Amino acid sequence: MSENIILTHLEIEHKIKRISYQIYETFVDEQEIVIAGIAKNGFVFAEKLARNVEHISDIKVILCEVHSNKQNPFEPITTSLPSSSYQNKGLILVDDVLNSGTTLVYGVKHFLNVPLKKFKTAVLVDRNHKKYPVKVDFKGISLSTSLQEHVQIVFEKENSYAYLSQ
């Protein structure tokens, strides 16, 4: 098994900063937005985006953790917030890596049951292996990989990185 670093800590920090500015530009007229991260790494990425958006703007960010069963996406999705907390607000659904699009598309479906002002998606790495017609609004990088390769994001305080393994 070989590993190739595709994003260093500094590159990830730059991607987070750039995506944060894109979020700010998209939601510039909003007082408050919701950043909903898919549990585990998607939520860690969402926390980093939230801190940056609040640092560069006056927008108040409400964080929401999204729990889904990635092995069985038909199971109901749950969130750390009641739906009334994100109703009629701008919302960004965040994950670390977009592989087949299954997790993101079922996450989108969950949030479409509530009226939202604006709905966007963000990922750090878009792998271009989609089973579903999912377009990401904000992405760090697009990466063409083989189906045998796996992208992993490691979030550590001082040494985050992304690598590709076979």
Image: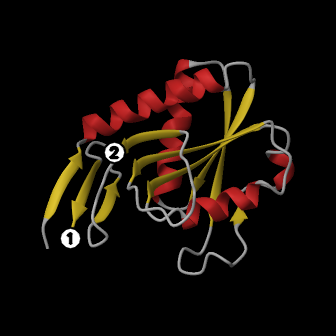
Pointer 1 residue: 166
Q: Residue furthest left?
A: 2
Q: Residue at x 86, y 46 (%)?
A: 115
Q: Nearer the viewer, residue 61 or 144?
A: 144
The type of colouring in the image is: secondary structure
Mark 2 nearby-residue class (10 Å; few <14, some 14–19, many ≥20): few
116 sits left or right of 92 in the view: right
Q: Is residue 21 above or below residue 82?
A: above
Image coordinates of residue 64 in percent, x first then y, are 66, 50
Judged from the image, the secondary structure of the residue bearing numbered disc 1 is loop
Q: Nearer the viewer, residue 102 or 19?
A: 102
Q: Of the residues shown, which amino acid type is indicated by label 1?
A: Gln
Q: Is residue 137 above or below residue 42?
A: above
117 sits left or right of 37 in the view: right
Give the Cα separation between the discs numbered 2 and 1: 26 Å
The quadrant where residue 50 appears = top right
Pointer 2 residue: 157
Image coordinates of residue 46 in percent, x first then y, are 53, 45
Please identify, in this view, whether the residue under mark 2 or under mark 1 is nearer the observer. 1
Judged from the image, the secondary structure of the residue bearing numbered disc 2 is loop
The quadrant where residue 58 appears = top right
Image coordinates of residue 13 in percent, x first then y, are 34, 34
Image coordinates of residue 135 in percent, x first then y, are 55, 48
Q: Residue at x 20, y 70 (%)?
A: 166
Q: Residue at x 28, y 42 (%)?
A: 158
Dots 2, 1 in contact, CB < 8 A: no
Q: Of the residues shown, which amino acid type is indicated by label 2?
A: Lys
Pick the quarter of the image with the N terminus. Answer: bottom left
Q: Is residue 156 above or below residue 102?
A: above
Q: Residue at x 59, y 75 (%)?
A: 69
50 sits left or right of 83 in the view: left
